[in-house]
């Protein structure tokens, strides 16, 4: 059933984000052409194209956040919840559906950012310098630890994004326990969640004081792992806590708008 939910949820976000990705790519082409070697280097047009690219990029990131919030709020706490909550789907599956869909589109937005950067390089002339790099020499410098480090960083980014999404979901769900002014209550709940994490972080340093020292004295891959792995595990623990908060409140104290 989770798969069926995702087949509906993922396109629902895509219908609004994909056109923005196309506009982003077009803005990247325009910026690349303006800074390219074949142009007269008009500073005015370069500034205009850069502002256009930045504006579209900002709109996409803001829209992605707004859509992630709206889809959760409307589907599980708004008018759509009257229908969704009677489906033969568990509350956990509903939450997981929203989380997975949000992470997919966060990932795709990151990919889109990388693609637009490559487009700028392609049309700006830097791409041809890029392909003439001595890649054999570069590849010789890449060690097994470097690959593992790259993978760990990707995992950390993925988990951190999941934690942020679940922070938002938990704050919205807690805020909807208020009888009125749910938006303000949700903002207050989010601030409370950030304070909660800060207190947990301070408590963690009390029991593991060496962690703070290690973060400022990283000299090799082994030390980096001693920081990265606990950080990932802590983020996963927070995701589980926020997931449980949403699940309990949706099952026991659902307050539909």
Image: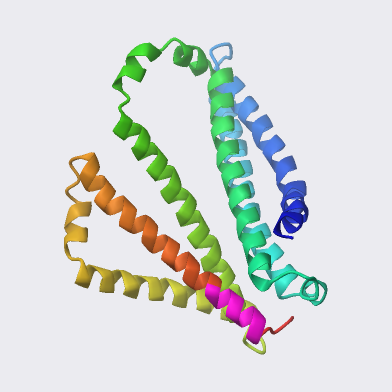
Position of residue 210 measured from the top left corner of the image (x, y, whole percent): 16, 61
21 relative to 34, above or below: below
23 relative to 230, above or below: above
* Residue 73 in sight in this render: yes
Picture quadrant where residue 78 is located: bottom right
As for residue 222 lying within the magenta part, the answer is no
Question: How many numbered marks have been drawn onto this rendered protein structure?
Answer: 0
Direction bottom: furthest residue:
179
81 relative position to 154: left or right: right
As for residue 251 lying within the magenta part, the answer is yes
241 relative position to 250: left or right: left
Position of residue 49 measured from the top left corner of the image (x, y, whole percent): 60, 31
The residue drawn where x is 38% and y is 59% is: 233
Q: Classify the position of the N terminus by image quarter.
A: bottom right
The residue drawn where x is 50% and y is 55% is: 161
Q: How is the image coloured?
A: rainbow
Position of residue 36 measured from the top left corner of the image (x, y, whole percent): 55, 17
Q: Which residues are magenta?
A: 244-252
Classified by dominant secondary structure, the portion drawn in magenta counts as helix
226 relative position to 58: left or right: left
Picture quadrant where residue 146 is located: top left
Closest to the observer, 63 or 3: 3
């Amino acid at each position: 059933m989770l798969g069926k939910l995702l087949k509906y949820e993922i396109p629902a976000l895509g219908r609004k984000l994909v056109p923005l990705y196309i506009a982003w790519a077009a803005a990247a082409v325009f910026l690349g052409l303006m800074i390219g070697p074949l142009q007269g280097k008009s500073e005015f047009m370069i500034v205009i194209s850069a502002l256009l690219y930045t504006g579209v990029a900002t709109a996409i990131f803001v829209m992605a956040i707004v859509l992630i919030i709206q889809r959760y709020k409307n589907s599980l706490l708004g008018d759509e919840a009257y229908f969704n909550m009677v489906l033969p789907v568990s509350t956990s599956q509903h939450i997981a559906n929203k989380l997975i869909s949000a992470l997919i589109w966060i990932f795709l937005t990151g990919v889109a950012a990388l693609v637009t950067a490559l487009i700028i390089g392609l049309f700006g002339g830097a791409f041809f310098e890029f392909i003439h790099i001595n890649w054999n020499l570069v590849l010789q410098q890449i060690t097994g630890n470097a690959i593992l480090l790259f993978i760990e960083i990707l995992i950390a980014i993925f988990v951190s994004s999941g934690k942020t999404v679940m922070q938002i979901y938990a704050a919205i769900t807690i805020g909807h326990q208020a009888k009125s002014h749910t938006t303000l209550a949700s903002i207050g709940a989010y601030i409370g969640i950030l304070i909660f994490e800060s207190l947990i972080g301070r408590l963690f340093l009390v029991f593991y004081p060496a962690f703070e020292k290690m973060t400022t004295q990283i000299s090799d891959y082994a030390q980096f792992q001693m920081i990265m792995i606990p950080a990932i595990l802590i983020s996963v623990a927070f995701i589980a806590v926020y997931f449980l908060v949403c699940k309990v409140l949706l099952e026991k104290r659902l307050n539909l708008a």
